[in-house]
Image (tube, rainbow, N blue to C red):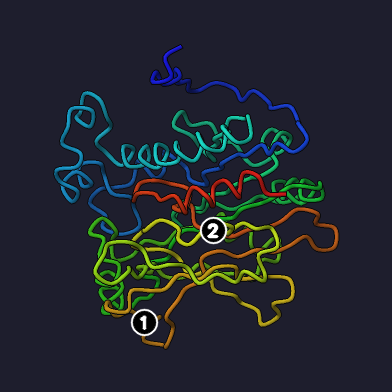
Amino acid sequence: MNSNIKPARTYNQNHVPRKYTAGKRRISIYWTWSYPWESNRELRVLDNRFSTMTEVRRVSWPDYETPEWDEMHFLQGIEGTLELFHRSTLSFQGLAEEITGYPVAIFQRIDQAGYKLPIDERILADTDTLMVFGLDHLLSGQEAASEEIAAIREWLKREGTCLLIGPHHDVGFTDDMKQRQVEYKHHGDELVPRQQRFGQYTRSLMKAFDVPVINQFGLRPAVVKGTKEIAPLTINKELDKLELLKGVTTFNFHPHLPHYALTTKDIKHIHVLARQPIDLDRPHPFTQAGNTEFNALIWMPPQDKRAGHILLADSTIFTTLFGGTDSLENFWRNIAVMK
């Protein structure tokens, strides 16, 4: 078979469970959004919606002006932008499958066809690492039900499990319009409105599992002077017992990343493994308060009845919408082989 030929794509089929193999991690991605709610947002509303593909084309011109992105081949509304997120994880999926021997299962809370899938045994039974990507707008009201929390809690009693929670940014949370404008100028992404608040579902998970973190702001990473390369992470190697950051110096650049603020002073059971330097040339209330870095990767080791690990990392670390690096692939590998 020609290795350049891509596999046939399937859609709207039932998941085929993956059998357990010792030492091989089965990874699943769960998008927390209601695809219909997000794609049906009123375009005359400025805030708290994804951009349309038409808006993406206008801002990113001429990147999407080739035939494969026209109205014959690709969706032009908000749903087109949502599909970009799906496409952006393909490289991670390919690498993870190469390492583990298992395809990465992709689930959505409410999918394109209108089917709702809560997190339950259908997802958890053949999953070792569950990556919950919090790209649901707060306004959509996504919350983890008590049955989901109970199912995840039971799953985390199983040795070798890992729950990766990825709440996205919270831009313009304030009613102060001047601050919203400052935040907008800081990240510099014309596709992000003055207010774009994400992650209610992931916030409900963090509350349920006593994860003392809140996703704040949308901060622009610093770059190496004179280049467009993202500045290296500040890594706490002594705390990195799982070697998640082995061979890792940077993640990928994304102009508005969340700060995972700790809401506790008791750091015995929660560890900030990596911090990202912030672009200090662009004013922001967070840096004006004296901060120069934001928390980018957090680990909560097993505790009490929880045998599984909990990680916090933004979903964009696993995408290639804003490029990728060898360092990023090393992080993906470390996630795929973690013990």
Mark nearest the camera among 2 and 1 is 2
Q: Position of residue 93 (x, y in %)?
A: 51, 36
| 29 left or right, relative to 271 | left
**Residue 198 falls in image quadrant:** bottom left
| 106 left or right, relative to 39 | right
Residue placed most toward the observer, 257 or 53:
257
| 292 left or right, relative to 271 | left
- Label 2 crowd (10 A; few <14 / some 14-19 / many >=20): many
Residue 82: image tag: none
In the image, what residue occupies the spot 19% across and 43% down?
57
In the image, what residue occupies the spot 20% across and 39% down?
64
Q: Is residue 130 above or below residue 9?
A: below
Which residue is farthest right?
A: 305
Q: Is residue 246 visible?
A: yes
Q: Position of residue 285 (x, y in %)?
A: 36, 82
Q: Position of residue 96 (x, y in %)?
A: 56, 38
| 58 left or right, relative to 97 | left
Element carrying mark 1: helix
**Residue 289 falls in image quadrant:** bottom left
Q: Give amino acid for label 2.
A: Ala
Q: Position of residue 138 (x, y in %)?
A: 46, 58
The number of numbered discs placed on residues in the rendered structure image is 2
In the image, what residue occupies the spot 55% across and 21% down?
13
**Residue receiving disc 2:** 313
**Residue receiving disc 1:** 285
Q: Is residue 35 above or below residue 140?
A: above
Question: Label 2 vs label 1: CA separation?
Answer: 22 Å
Q: Give amino acid for label 1.
A: Pro
